[in-house]
Image (cartoon, helix red, strand yellow):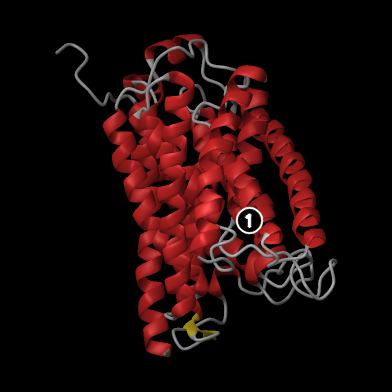
């Protein structure tokens, strides 16, 4: 099965990159106003490029190096030192495992973009994202997936945290970072405008759904029944959450919106991500059904009760979804409660503190928020000298 494993992970790697480019870019781009859509595209594209270089340079070694400790992997694999086309990681060429994990390192900081769209400087996006991936994301990867302190044999004993594809590693870290940035950045001057292109939002969500088969199915790191089950439960949770979000929206407001339904899709995908290697279709149905309602209520809480302008609801959908799915693994008896809750607490505190420190540092070096005039005229023109549309026609 070695050849089959390699072939599948090559496909999965392409699918996960497809989630960011163009999936997430279109999903987020459609949700902002017309004068800011290119800035969102630019953020996603530039992050994909910068994270690829940073992951090669040192990120992969921090996460999966063998010269460190339970805290980090060390620097022995910087620039893939000592790794050739024949070097193996399990049944896979290690260079392929590197590439697959690189696509995760791309999309995780890209998710945070949704918290600060329409009001942040481009320099901040690049510098913060790079530092955050190296100093927050990569260490957490090592703790859970790289044999570090939260994995089997770590601080929780023989059975460590269970996070199949990134409920803690990806969605909790990005969701909490988004919330911290939204609080520190402050609300947009005008929060009243609706998404400028719901069609983009739907197309982007559909691309994310397809790409998620590589995200979760590929995390099995093999072409076998486990990958097939992960893919299947991913689809079931996404479909169910889409329906439960739309139904809850209809009950509360009298209408079910397209943007709402596809946001439910993402909530279902985020929620099944940590559990996709440990549950079956019935459990996925339950996770998805709850996620569509839970994450919608989290959106209302963050926006209305807390009045935090996490613009595209990154914490409510990804953060809450990832945390919920992580807990559900223990609910279904597939993980230790202590390991799941303890890991969520440790990673949660770490993510909040590191994010806040990096925001302060990056703000001091390159600035943070654009001026009022740029925010009014739009980041497309003010930051990049371009417009997505001819505003005169």
Quarter where residue 266 is shown: top left
Q: Quadrant of the N terminus?
A: bottom left
Quarter where residue 211 is shown: bottom left
Front one among 266 and 137? 266
Q: Residue at x 79, y 71 (%)?
A: 69
Q: Is residue 348 above or below residue 10?
A: above
For disc 1, the neighbor class at 10 Å (few under 14, some 14 to 19, many from 20) is many
Q: Residue at x 29, y 27 (%)?
A: 197
Front one among 207 and 56? 207
Q: Where is residue 189 shown, x and y percent of the image?
A: 52, 10
Q: Where is residue 163 shown, x and y percent of the image?
A: 64, 62
Residue 4 visible to an observer of this rendering? yes
Quarter where residue 336 is shown: bottom right
Q: Is residue 180 above or below residue 227?
A: above
Q: In the visual, does 340 lie left or right of 114?
A: right
Q: Where is residue 172 shown, x and y percent of the image?
A: 64, 47
Which residue bears the numbered disc 1? 169
Q: In the visual, does 258 lie left or right of 189?
A: left
Q: Is residue 128 above or below residue 282?
A: above
Secondary structure under badge 1? helix
Q: In the visual, does 223 lie left or right of 69?
A: left
Q: Is residue 232 above or below residue 42?
A: below
Front one among 77 and 176? 176
Q: Residue at x 46, y 36 (%)?
A: 245
Q: Quadrant of the C terminus?
A: top left
Q: Where is residue 368 shown, x and y percent of the image?
A: 59, 25
Front one among 100 and 66? 100
Q: Residue at x 58, y 17 (%)?
A: 187
């Amino acid at each position: 099965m070695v050849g089959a494993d390699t072939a599948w992970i090559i496909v999965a790697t392409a699918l996960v990159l497809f989630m960011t480019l163009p999936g997430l870019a279109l999903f987020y781009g459609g949700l902002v106003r017309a004068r800011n859509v290119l800035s969102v595209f630019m953020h996603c594209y530039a992050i994909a490029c910068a994270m690829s270089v940073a992951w090669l340079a040192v990120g992969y070694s921090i996460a999966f190096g063998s010269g460190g400790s339970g805290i980090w992997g060390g620097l022995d694999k910087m620039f893939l030192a000592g790794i050739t086309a024949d070097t193996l990681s399990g049944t896979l060429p290690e260079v392929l495992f590197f590439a697959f994990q690189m696509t995760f390192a791309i999309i995780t900081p890209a998710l945070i973009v949704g918290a600060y769209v329409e009001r942040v400087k481009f320099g901040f996006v690049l510098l913060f994202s790079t530092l955050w991936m190296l100093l927050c994301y990569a260490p957490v990867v090592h703790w859970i997936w790289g044999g570090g302190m939260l994995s089997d044999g770590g601080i929780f004993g023989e059975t460590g945290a269970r996070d199949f594809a990134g409920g803690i590693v990806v969605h909790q870290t990005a969701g909490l970072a988004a919330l911290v940035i939204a609080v520190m950045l402050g609300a947009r001057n005008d929060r009243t405008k609706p998404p400028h292109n719901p069609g983009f939002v739907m197309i982007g969500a559909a691309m994310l759904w397809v790409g998620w088969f590589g995200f979760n199915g590929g995390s099995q790191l093999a072409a076998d029944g486990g990958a097939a089950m992960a893919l299947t439960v991913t689809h079931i949770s996404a479909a169910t959450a889409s329906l439960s979000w739309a139904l809850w929206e209809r009950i509360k407001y009298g209408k079910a919106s397209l943007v709402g339904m596809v946001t439910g899709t993402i909530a279902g995908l985020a929620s099944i991500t940590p559990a996709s290697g440990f549950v079956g279709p019935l459990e996925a149905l339950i996770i998805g059904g709850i996620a569509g309602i839970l994450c919608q209520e989290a959106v209302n809480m963050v926006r209305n009760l807390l009045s935090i302008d996490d613009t595209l609801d990154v914490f409510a959908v990804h953060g809450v979804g990832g945390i919920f799915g992580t807990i559900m693994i223990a609910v279904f008896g597939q993980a230790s409660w202590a390991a799941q809750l303890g890991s969520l607490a440790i990673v949660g505190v770490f993510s909040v503190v590191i994010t806040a420190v990096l925001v302060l540092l990056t703000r001091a070096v390159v600035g943070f928020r654009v001026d009022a005039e740029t925010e009014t005229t739009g980041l497309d023109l003010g930051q990049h000298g371009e417009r997505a549309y001819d505003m005169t026609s």
